[in-house]
Image (spheres, rainbow, N blue to C red):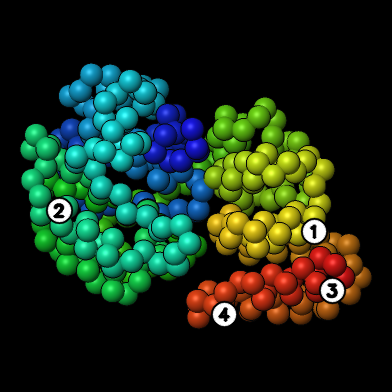
Amino acid sequence: MELHPNNQIKLYGFNETFELLKNLFDQKKIPNKILFSGQKGIGKATFAYHLSNYIFSKNEKYPYKITEYQIDTNNRSFNFVINNSHPNFFLIDLKDGKKNIEISQIREMINYTNKSSFNSNDKIIIIDNVEFLNTNSVNALLKVLEEPNEKIIFFLIHDNQKKISSTLKSRCIEFNLHLSNSIKKKIIDSLTEENFYNSLSNDFKNYYISPGQYINLYYYCQNNNLDFKNIDIGVFLKDLILNYQIKKSSFLRENLIQYIEFFFAKKFNTHESKNDTHNLYKKFIEKIYNIKKYNLDLETLLIEINSELINE
């Protein structure tokens, strides 16, 4: 089964926040518009899916295992959600190959909110990657959020390294999620082969990478027959660029800046000309920024990176 927040059975970390929201739900006091903010890849969406399962499964067979912070895979609601067939669940996320969450997705969700819930139970709407909502999508969403509906709970997921609408933020109760380094390592070890982090090439070890980013790196290496124990960052970038040109790799789009930073960090440590390296770094970061700002294509930049950085 493909690794996805909706099928992660075990929740690591965030115990206090989970207990707080669980108790608020039990007391019928849970806020119905919640924003989960934090570093990309720490498990914000996984947290939202676990809380959703607690809510859905509370009166079902095989309910959420609260003492273990674990979903029972025999639970009906869990299996409906992962198959995208739960009548009281709706997901909005950035579609593959798209640069924004489209207003058509918000309109589809609005139609969903106007329908009665199954068995008069709570509906849950998860909006992942809210930083990719464009202006029209945000405005349409705000209209829904401003209309009180006690039977609908919104969980919004936000990468806090990227800005979102201040008005959207003000409509929600925000929870900032963090993980300790020991919990991060525990998550990484549980979802990869044993001792992956300690075995990883020094070119990729960095304290600010989240578990999700490490795990994506692990599976990218596995799927592309790359030796994560010995791989050089330059060789890795070259492979990414080749794969992007062949498959339009979303992995590269999402992680390009991070790996260019790793490449230059190594360059700073091994090259005498620090100023030249710094100027080159600024040049490529500015190019990436402009590509994102003006929705330009990556192809030309990747060719330049390959010829000017990797094959120098």
Disc marking residue 274: 3
Secondary element at image label 2 = helix
Q: Is residue 49 above or below residue 234?
A: above
Residue that mark 4 sits on: 290
Q: Nearer the viewer, mark 3 or mark 1?
A: 1
- Do tag 2 and tag 4 residues touch (Cβ < 8 Å)? no
Whether the residues at callouts 3 and 1 have beta carbons within 8 Å, the answer is no
User: Answer yes or no: do the residues labelled 1 and 4 have beta carbons within 8 Å?
Assistant: no
Count of numbered tags: 4
Q: Are marks 2 and 3 in contact (CB under 8 Å)?
A: no
Pointer 4: residues within 10 angstroms few (<14), some, or many (20+)?
A: few
Q: Earlier in the sequence, mark 2 or mark 4?
A: 2
Q: Say whether disc 3 or disc 1 marks the residue closer to the N-terminus.
A: 1
Amino acid, disc 4: Asn
Residue visible at 15% across and 57% down in the picture: 111
2 or 3: tag closer to the N-terminus: 2
Evaluate whether residue 110 shows in this view: yes
Residue visible at 57% across and 80% down? Answer: 290
